[in-house]
Amino acid sequence: MSRLLALMGQRARRDWLQVLLWAVGTALLAYASFVGVSDAYGTEQDRTSLLGAALANPVILLFRGLPSGTGEGAFMVFLIFPWLAMLAAFMSTFLAVRHTRGDEEAGRAELVAATPAARTLPFFATALHGLLANALLAALTAAAFLAVGLDVEGSLLAGTAVGAVGLTFLGVGLFAAQLMRTSRGANSLAVWTLVATFVISGLGNAIGTPSDDLTRMESSWLTWLSPFGWGENTRAFDENLWWPALLCVGVGVLLTAVSAALVSARDLGGSFVAERLGRASASPALSTPAGLVWRLTRGAVLGWAVGGLLTGMLSTSLASIVKEVGASNPAVEEILRQISGEGSVEQGTITTFFTMLGVLAACCAVQIVCRARQEEAHGTAEPLLAAPVGRVRWLADYLVVALAGIVLVVAAAIGGAALGLASQDGEWDLMRTVFVTGAGQVAAASVFLVVTALAFVLVPRATIPLGWSLVLLGMMLGLFGPLFQFPDWLVHLSPIAVTPFVDGDDVDLRGLWWLVLATGVGAAASLSLMRRRELAAAG
């Protein structure tokens, strides 16, 4: 027991700030969201109208929770629960990989294994550490709901459901760490599992069965394949079902148990997915710095491009579903008419999906710039810069490859949209909307690229947290700002909120020229400042 407590103490000292930021940040998001929603949708009539719009437009349900009535608490859970659960999931997967595969890579696990703690006790210490971290996050989230005056049982269930989803992904992270050879590979596997299950849950809600009064939705079977769907089906502040949360916990425990068995079945530093051997000789593409950057980042670009392809396919495939829903229900048809304004319902659906595409493209760009920081921190950039490759050329290659990644992600989405139209015998005139909105999201994602590059030049050690935080902030303002009725000037700080879109037969350019100008100025400034910056080691 003393050895376990010692290992727990070591993890607490190492992680206390990170865990506290994740837990407090999740609780603050819950609290602030309720305050914003209460101000914007304070009456039952307001909430009923928005729920009617959501159930009429399945696209909205892809990025929200499960409608469970017009009560304040249930309405709040519908709007924000998937995002609270996503924060818990990210915290859990990163924690699991950091203390397992990450420690093996750094050599710490071997040192601990040489003590009486052996190999298995550190694993169980990590699992217990993750359990306590999720318990803290769940408690603070429940406290946030209680602080705004919601009922006790619903608040406790909502907080518990968020933490339970986190426990599922704690198991996912532990399992991924056993399969993959590197922490980067384990994190990638865990994150893609997270994204896939998030989308599956949203799709399951989107194709569910709405109630006659358009205030509730019964999930389809697809939702029950996702931990996010299990958490949403607790229906906090409405039916208050506890057993779906227990399902999340059970799967997390099962994955943890399997991972514990795998720990003892492999060598320290080994993995069940073999690491690919490198080529005996380099290809001609590696004769340039840009070729090396592409080689290091092509896997990430391919992954984001697949996400873009799926987003494009859904944008046009679901457009026909939205139209059919309106045709079969007069009340829904009227709501859709109000949503689409001068444009068609299909145009509005495509614009909504391509707004999310802008976030994916921005993530691709930020990940590539963050790779530059990782190369610098790990010391692998220094030998390269000792060759006839200047700092400016080195950074410029990362910017060029990142811009190419943005274009590839958007191009994949455009191709996916065409496939969606072909599969549905859709209206090919919609491709005009696809091209306009896609081009706008290239401009928006490029702004995130150059801002992250500026952070890399000016505050290199803060590049990774600052870059991802800016993407998260831009997503929150662009996607949630109009819903929470934030001031226009605040919403328009997000590049994805000011991109061109098709409005009927016209094209509204909105802030396109500002986006282009910001990209040009940011790129020039980052390259100019890089000329005088020294390499910054890790720390």
Image (cartoon, rainbow, N blue to C red):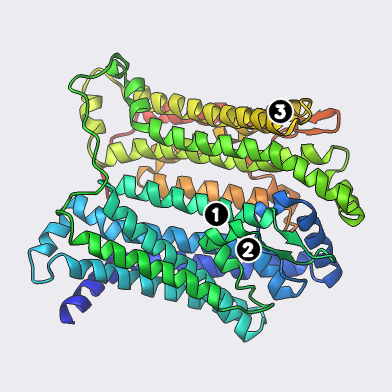
Horizontal and vertical percent position of residue 154: 62, 80
Whether 520 is drawn above or below 94: the answer is above
Q: Nearer the viewer, residue 445 or 272?
A: 272
Horizontal and vertical percent position of residue 314: 65, 40
Horizontal and vertical percent position of residue 235: 64, 73
Label 1: how many residues lie within 10 Å, few (<14), some (14-19) or many (20+)?
many
* The quarter of the displayed image where residue 103 is located: bottom left
User: Which quarter of the rendered picture does the N terminus lie within?
Assistant: bottom left
- Per the image, the residue denoted by label 2 is 80
Q: Is residue 3 left or right of residue 351?
A: left
Q: Amino acid at mark 3?
A: Val
- Per the image, the residue denoted by label 1 is 198
- Per the image, the residue denoted by label 3 is 436
Q: Nearer the viewer, residue 486 or 56?
A: 56
Label 2: how many residues lie within 10 Å, few (<14), some (14-19) or many (20+)?
some
Residue at point 55% right, 54% down? 198
Q: Is residue 250 left or right of residue 321?
A: left
Q: Nearer the viewer, residue 121 or 374?
A: 121
Q: Amino acid at mark 1?
A: Phe
